[in-house]
Image (tube, rainbow, N blue to C red):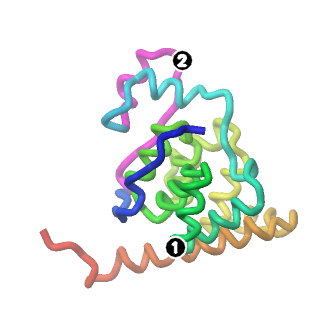
Amino acid sequence: MSSTKPSVLNSKVQKSKSIKLYNFTNLTNLTNLTNLKNFKNLSPFTLYLLSTSPFMHCLTDYDTKILIAFNMSLQGDKKFSEFLMQNGFPELEALAEAIHSNIQALEWLAKNGYPEFAVLSNAIDDEPEAIEWLQKYHCDFLSRFAAACRKDPRAMKWFANNDLKLFIMMIANIQNILMYQSWDSSDIHKFRRS
């Protein structure tokens, strides 16, 4: 677990759909990485290490009470956000913030050893490169989770058939978040003037 905690998670920043955060394909040597620098402060070597990590994190790795706290954090309950931060789970708080369109949280996930969670956030947003990345690196549960968040009927049925009630609650919360983000993006009163 990284000792660096994301201190920038409170700002809400709109996610740009044009940002391609992860395109870790054909990473056979460091020279291939020079064109894949998707984050300003990441070196090619860091990108290489992130993409070849032997251990991929998954939501199923966490205890039920931690996942409940994550679910409450997704709903915006700051007590649970603080709980995650103070008890060694900043990656889950960063994921919750990334799902809420916080680019800084997304970058924190990538820089601190959780690229699969950053990609998960993008896959939830239906970004083809992220969906492909999860499939390519055999993040099957995360791929299915993202699909269910996008209301894919087969993925939603899989969670129901396996009686994964906690994950079903998380998926419903994320679907609500995506719905509100969609409404906000089309609300003329919320457009910035610059």
- Say whether residue 57 is left or right of residue 42: right
Crowd around label 2: few <14 · some 14–19 · many ≥20 (10 Å): few
> Residue at (67%, 64%) from the top-left corner?
148
Label the magenta part by its dominant secondary structure: loop
Q: Which residue is mark 2?
A: 28
Q: Which SS class for mark 2?
A: loop
Q: Amino acid at mark 1?
A: Gly
How far from the left and from the top, in percent, is residue 16?
35, 57
In the picture, which quadrant includes the C terminus? bottom left
How far from the left and from the top, in percent, is residue 18?
35, 52
- Say whether residue 12 is left or right of residue 144: left
Q: Are marks 1 and 2 in contact (CB under 8 Å)?
A: no
In the picture, which quadrant includes the N terminus? top right
Is 162 drawn above or below residue 51 in the view shown? below
Quarter holding residue 145: bottom right
How far from the left and from the top, in percent, is residue 106?
45, 50
Q: Which disc number belongs to residue 76?
A: 1
Q: Which residues are magenta?
A: 17-38
